[in-house]
């Protein structure tokens, strides 16, 4: 009796382990959807550490949509780190849109890090990208702030290895700056903003990218700073500082020259007493002549002092009269 109970318990445990390990529910769903997935295939997925639900449900979806994919293809893509569901959704969307995309190409795009489903959707429904405000300066020095809307469509053939949205926006910004910069004046750009779109489109900015530019529309143009006048003002200020520096240099040289001349005069005056003494010793000048010279110098100093005092008195009197 005990042996039968133990045997029954072992059988129940094996049945539970079987249903836990073997996704019987998925197998039933696959059979009901007319998808050929064997029970041993599901067991093999478990052993290969593949989640059966990640394979069976996309396979059911693809079969119902009429997409011919194999279990081994989906399983290999999953093991490679790809998103099986996204690839199947992309194949279904492409088939509905009449696009010819093979499973190998879709899986390669997915493994390259691109969202293949979004790429297919953008191929069918173009996406509008809005650029930030782009600063450009016309030849007359007026800055224009331009904002553009770019309509792009994914190019599936160039999606692997092609540049992304950031490159497209950078090229469009470069094209706008070049176009505005070649205009003679900002008024020309404001009168014909569509010329920017035409010239930028002619440059083939989508070359080497994963997108095809359908149209470029100028959304807004604002007038910014007068860059030319600002640069001229800065240049004038710089020239003024240079002129001031040169004038200060000349003034310093003049002061230095004056000091040198004063030093020369002082040096020459220092030689006068020696010359006088030499003249007295040699008899070229007498004592009486020497005293006459001293009287003349004293008289000159007195007259100079009187003149300075008279001038100061006159200035003081003038100031008093003005104040009165």
Image: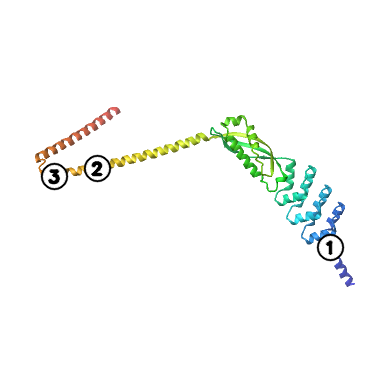
Front residue of this view, candidates 152 and 209 = 209
204 sits left or right of 117 in the view: left
Few, some or many C-alpha atoms within 10 Å of disc 3 (few <14, some 14-19, many ≥20)?
few
Residue receiving disc 3: 278
Q: Position of residue 38 (x, y in %)?
A: 85, 58
Marks 3 and 2 sit apart, C-alpha to C-alpha, by: 21 Å
Residue receiving disc 2: 264
State the SS at label 3: helix
Few, some or many C-alpha atoms within 10 Å of disc 1 (few <14, some 14-19, many ≥20)?
few
Q: Is residue 84 visible?
A: yes
- Viewer-nearest of discs 3 and 1: 3
Front residue of this view, candidates 175 and 186 = 175
Marks 1 and 2 sit apart, C-alpha to C-alpha, by: 119 Å
Q: Are marks 3 and 1 in contact (CB under 8 Å)?
A: no
State the SS at label 1: helix
- Viewer-nearest of discs 1 and 2: 2
Q: Quadrant of the C terminus?
A: top left
Q: Position of residue 317 (x, y in %)?
A: 25, 29
Q: Quadrant of the N terminus?
A: bottom right
Task: Say if 29 sits above or below 320 in the image.
Answer: below
Q: Position of residue 158 (x, y in %)?
A: 70, 45
State the SS at label 2: helix
Q: Are marks 3 and 2 in contact (CB under 8 Å)?
A: no
Few, some or many C-alpha atoms within 10 Å of disc 2 (few <14, some 14-19, many ≥20)?
few
Residue receiving disc 1: 18
């Amino acid at each position: 009796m005990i042996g039968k109970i133990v045997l029954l318990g072992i059988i129940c445990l094996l049945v539970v382990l079987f249903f836990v390990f073997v996704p019987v529910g998925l197998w039933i769903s696959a059979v009901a959807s007319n998808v050929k997935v064997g029970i041993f295939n599901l067991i093999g997925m478990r052993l290969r550490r593949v989640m059966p639900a990640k394979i069976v449900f996309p396979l059911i979806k693809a079969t119902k949509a009429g997409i011919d994919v194999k279990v081994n293809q989906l399983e290999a893509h999953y093991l490679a780190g790809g998103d099986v569901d996204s690839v199947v959704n992309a194949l279904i969307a492409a088939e509905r849109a009449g696009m010819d995309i093979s499973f190998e190409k879709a899986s390669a795009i997915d493994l390259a890090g691109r969202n293949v489903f979004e790429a297919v959707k953008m191929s069918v429904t173009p996406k509008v990208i809005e650029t930030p405000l782009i600063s450009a300066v016309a030849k007359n020095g007026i800055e224009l702030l331009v904002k553009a809307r770019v309509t792009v469509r994914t190019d599936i053939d160039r999606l692997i290895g092609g540049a992304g949205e950031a490159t497209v926006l950078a090229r469009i910004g470069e094209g706008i700056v070049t176009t505005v910069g070649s205009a003679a004046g900002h008024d020309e750009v404001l009168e014909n903003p569509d010329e920017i779109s035409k010239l930028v489109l002619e440059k083939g900015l989508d070359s080497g990218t994963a997108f095809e530019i359908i149209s470029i529309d100028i959304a807004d143009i604002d007038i910014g700073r007068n860059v030319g006048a600002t640069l001229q003002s800065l240049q004038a200020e710089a020239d003024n500082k240079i002129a001031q520096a040169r004038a200060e240099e000349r003034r310093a040289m003049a002061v230095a020259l004056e000091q040198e001349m004063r030093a020369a005069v002082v040096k020459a005056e220092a030689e006068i007493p020696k010359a006088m003494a030499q003249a007295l010793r040699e008899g070229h000048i007498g004592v009486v002549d020497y005293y006459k010279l001293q009287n003349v110098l004293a008289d000159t100093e007195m007259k100079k002092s009187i003149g300075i005092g008279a001038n100061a008195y006159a200035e003081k009197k003038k100031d008093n009269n003005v104040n009165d």
